Amino acid sequence: MLYQYLMKQHIGSPSVPVVKAGEEVKRGQLLGKKPEEALGANVFSSVSGTVKEVQEDRVLVEEKGTDFSTYLPLQESDPIRLVEESGLVGLGGAGFPTYVKLKTKFPEGKGVVLVNAAECEPILSHNLKRIEQDPEGLVKALLLAMELVKAVKGIIAIKYHHKEAIALLEKEIAKYPEKELSVYQLENIYPVGEERAIVRDALGILLDPEQLPSAADAIVLNAETLYRMREAIEEKKPLIDKDITVAGKLQEDAAIKVFLDEPLGQSVKALLDKAGGIGERYGEIIMGGPFTGHSCTMEDPMVKTTGGIIVAEEFFPGPEKIGLLVCACGANRERLIEQSEKMGSSYVGVEYCKQAKEVKGTRKCENPGHCPGQVQKVMALKKAGAQAVLVSNCTDCTNTVMSCAPQLGLPVYHCTDGALRSVNYKMIRRFKESE
């Protein structure tokens, strides 16, 4: 089977290929090197085999005879240098190189390591499964991160309804009474796993969109990122495997399947085959979660930031003219345009959530998940000739859209509809606290 390793799977500069076509490689061997003195991440082969082709943006390896129980170990000895060498990045979606966060050194008596165990996107459930299988590993990884950055406090942020995982984590935390560790229970809404939302909820500090968690004397690390950090330091394992959720219109309809330690670089098709195969009728294949994922092909490779593969339901036909309401927390403008075209609609206007602030070429919400209302935006789309609206709003934001759009005669479609319908989940419209 052919594996593809993209040279840019992270924030920063692309890696530089260090192998040649025809070369034999081993599992754990360096394929792409991070440029010196630049923000970036190394890329390693997750399989043994032969390099079939080296392109500017990727290396293709034909797998042969891989022993998946072993790998070439990392060479560094310093913990943070090991994390840097390993190629580890944030595995929750952003892909920021982890070693940079671990270079933070908090003043004496300060510093919090926040663990994002929210499993923020609907359907995705691989973080939860890993935690339920190995709560001890997460707590030990948290303690290790706290030691590296000299933090005095560690908080695991997880949605309140994951009762089993919470109980297991609290049992592990109780083994370390001398440490200031706790579990913070989040609401079951989107986007509670957004970095600034976790800081706000767990620490009571609302950061400006331009600010990083360091402004609150904190760093935020995804749960799987912490597990892989501990692997890099204690087992000298490069980032070559990842946990993933595969769901949707599979042969087993509406299925949600979790796979742990899947080798990076394999194709979407290979993952779908492991899940039993794709169904005959579907709308699109999404790489990522329902809110922020993007459409992909069967040939696309699984990369470091791939959290899910979702085979979405067929698109409902839309009206002739549709208005787009873009939220900083969900699908961007380009993604909504793509979805509107697949619905057979022409978009007549684009509005942005009133809290979506432009920051360095992207948009960030001023207060993630807390929406002040979207009436003016919806009315502007109605005035532009929209016969319906397609939105990418968060849970609370969508609530406010639903308070006005139907009264204006505008049906509401959401960017997550196809993904959620594919697993028989309730679509995001009106939200009640009891939900």
Image (cartoon, rainbow, N blue to C red):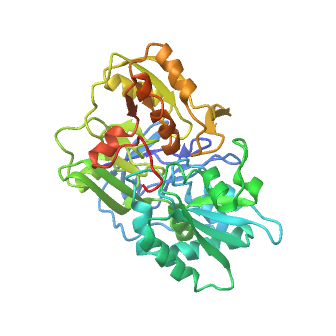
Residue sitting nearer the eye, 301 or 404:
404
Q: Which residue is farthest right?
A: 108
Note whether residue 8 is visible.
Answer: no
- What residue appears at the point 48 percent right and 56 percent down from the top-left corner? 188
Residue at 27% from the left image edge and 45% from the top image edge: 422
Pinpoint residue 130: horizontal percent, then vertical percent. 42, 68
Quarter of the figure that contains the C terminus: bottom left
> Could one spot residue 307 in this view of the protein?
yes
Q: Which residue is more in the foreground, 25 or 40?
A: 40
Q: Is residue 109 above or below residue 432?
A: below
362 relative to 321 in the view: left or right: right
Picture quadrant of residue 205: bottom right
- 230 vs 129, left or right, is right
Q: Camera-side residue: 64 or 296? A: 296
Percent position of residue 140, x then y: 57, 76
At 30% from the left and 51% from the top, the residue drawn is 247
Q: Nearer the viewer, residue 148 or 179?
A: 179
Q: With respect to residue 358, does 302 lie above or below? A: below
Q: Does residue 44 lie above or below 280 as drawn?
A: below
Seen as rendered, the residue at the extreme front is 407
Among the 4 quarters of the image, the one containing residue 134: bottom left
The x, y position of residue 106, in whole percent, is: 78, 65
Q: Left of 320 or right of it: where is 75?
A: right
Identify which residue is drawn at 29% across, 56% down: 256
